[in-house]
Image: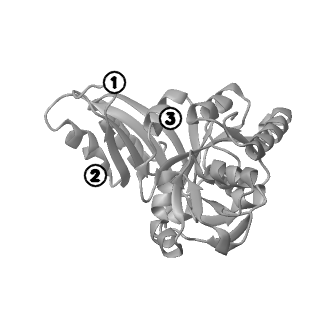
Amino acid sequence: MDNYPEPARRLVAAMTDAADREPRRTVAFQGAPGAYSHQAVREAFPDALPLPCLSFEDAIEAVQSGAAAKGMIPIENSLHGRVADIHFLLPESGLHIIAEHFVRVRHCLLSGGERGQVREALSHPQALGQCRARLKDWGIKAVGAFDTAGAAALVAERGDPALAAVASALAGELYGLTTHAEGIEDAPHNTTRFVVLARDAVLPQPGEPVMTSLNFEVRQRPAALFKALGGFATEGVNITKLESYLRDGSFAAAEFYAEVEGAESDAAVARALDELRYHTNWLRLLGTYPRARERS
């Protein structure tokens, strides 16, 4: 976090100290204070101590080591699809998915001066791209930065009224900036889905709608994927997500990440998983967790 502006470094130091004192209350996330991952922690766990981490690997390692009880990790965005490398990191972490949380990404125009003084807006290139039309209408030049919250911290540090940031309302609150406009993104559905990781699995309440995440590698045989997934169709188990990805530069064998409705303990899901195991080289169950209300 040493590369962040001073306002962010101060917050990181204070939040890290608090987390060190009470790791059982701590939820690790990737990014600077005020990032949308930080917002996700505040929404899902209002009483938790957020722990900012430089990378996804650092956030996962904090949970593995016990420095944090949980980790809040983004897995996909409604505009940009899956988050890079997450499908590799999750199964390798040895952690369990125990919950999911959806964050509506509402970009704000933040500065330390008046709205009419703003000439440039700093933010992550993806965030700037999502607000292209509004910034153009206002005659504000978009300037790329390393991330949204870090851009807000930099605007606070520089104190230049001509400079603004595109970031979350939380970032504006943390760095003492004025929110000139909220929800300036061009697409009204911009939403990021997060998963919550923990060292131990958590059993959902009986009768609670749940999801199960898993990944697997099919055998190199004709129609292997079709046969592997046949059990889900036979048992009436809904597959809500199926994505393929390649590992280690190999084009010979594809790995798959999938999400299904139901728990491993459900009879129909258990039979479908048995069929899946028969047609795969390996299968990893990443967790069963309550289905978020946003899915409905």
Please state which of residues 8 and 236 is positioned toward the viewer in this rendering: 8
Using the image, determine if residue 269 lies above or below residue 142.
Answer: above
Identify residue type, mark 3: Leu
Identify residue type, mark 2: Ala
Q: Crowding at label 3, few (<14), some or many (≥20) Cα neighbours within 10 Å?
A: many
For the N terminus, the quadrant is top right
Sequence order check, earlier mark of 1 and 2: 2
- Residue 231 seen anywhere in this rendered image of the structure: yes
The residue mark sitting in front, 1 or 2, is: 1
Using the image, determine if residue 186 lies above or below residue 288.
Answer: below
Where in the figure is residue 287, as x and y percent of width and height?
52, 40
Identify residue type, mark 1: Asp
The residue identified by callout 2 is 233
Sequence order check, earlier mark of 3 and 1: 3
| Alpha-carbon span between mark 3 and mark 1 | 16 Å
Using the image, determine if residue 279 lies above or below residue 287.
Answer: above
Q: Crowding at label 1, few (<14), some or many (≥20) Cα neighbours within 10 Å?
A: few
Q: Crowding at label 2, few (<14), some or many (≥20) Cα neighbours within 10 Å?
A: few
The residue identified by callout 1 is 248
The residue identified by callout 3 is 90
| Alpha-carbon span between mark 3 and mark 2 | 26 Å
